[in-house]
Image (cartoon, rainbow, N blue to C red):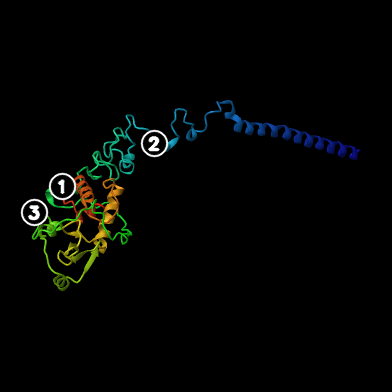
Amino acid sequence: MRIVLVLICSFALASLALGAQEEKKKEQPKKKGAQAGQVSKPAGKPTGKPATAGRPATTGKPAGAGKPAKAGKPAHAGKPAETGNVAGMSTGKGKGKGKHAEAGQAAGAGQATAGAKQPGGGKKTGAGKPGEAATAATTGKGAAKGKPFKPQHFNLASKTKPNKAVAPAVNFQQGRRIEGSHNWQGSNYQVFRNYRSEWHDRDWWRHNHSRIVFVFGGPYYWNSGYWFPAWGYDPGAYYAYDGPIYAYNNLPPDQVIANVQAALQQQGYYRGEVDGLLGPLTREAVANYQRDHGLYTTSTIDRPTLESLGMA
């Protein structure tokens, strides 16, 4: 009998335990469903709206601190952002006025930039004022230095006889002065103002000047950076020009003249042959260049002209 009661009690306890396990199993899905419902709860809402901090800019506005109202928003009337004033310095937009390049003005109240070309051809860039060359006739200063011109050596030695039809010989006149030189002001033209033609024999020239060269048979003496015709050294010598010639790059007179002719050819002023003779065609080309660049019209090779050509 006891055995029967023990078995009944054991069976009852087992049934209770089994029932308790089934109830736990039923409760567990409900709890999991509640958790899942918490996670998927927003699923029923519109899918296009993220959390508050991550709202998409449906109107073009970035979220949070990225709103363009202060940093990236295009100003209402083309004005840059509060921190965008520096654009006036970096991009050439109007500085301090807050306006975009409405009229294309650069920083500095509309003055031309340093690299911009000014209308008129003869004006310097950057300030809009005429170049120094434009005032040379009144101040005696030379034109602004041009693009460097590399000196060349021309083969003129074979031309022992000059073409006198192109460059006729000039005649000696004792004490001759250079016409118009008294109007040329400045130290660069003093040598022309002081020049007087002199006639001396060979011994006198050798005694007073140690450096004498011959160009097409004519002797030239060097003095203080200039070449001069040594009249009388050879009574029958040929000269195409009577006056000083600037000794550019320590070259003899014919090479100086040839380099000037080549430089003027490049700029369209001289159309003759590069022959090393300062004849009428070359002097005319030099004079035209000087007039166009605001220099004194010396019609010869002076230092300001060579500086303007980039040769000195």
Tell me residue 291's x, y (percent): 18, 46
Which residue is label 1 attached to?
Answer: 135
In this view, which residue lies farthest toward the front? Answer: 236
Q: CA distance from mark 3 to mark 1?
A: 18 Å
Q: Quadrant of residue 175?
A: bottom left
Which residue is label 3 attached to?
Answer: 182
| Amino acid residing under circle 1 | Thr
First reached walking from the N terminus: tag 2 or tag 1? 2
- From the image, state whether disc 2 or disc 3 is nearer to you: 3
In this rendering, is residue 82 above or below 150?
Answer: above
Residue at left 24%, top 63%? 217
| Amino acid residing under circle 3 | His
| Amino acid residing under circle 2 | Gly
Label 3 element class: helix
Image disc number at residue 15: none
Q: Quadrant of the C terminus?
A: bottom left
First reached walking from the N terminus: tag 3 or tag 1? 1
In this rendering, is residue 218 above or below 36?
Answer: below
Closer to the camera in the image, 4 or 119: 119
Image disc number at residue 72: 2
Tell me residue 133's x, y (percent): 19, 48
Q: Quadrant of residue 237?
A: bottom left
Residue at left 26%, top 62%? 249
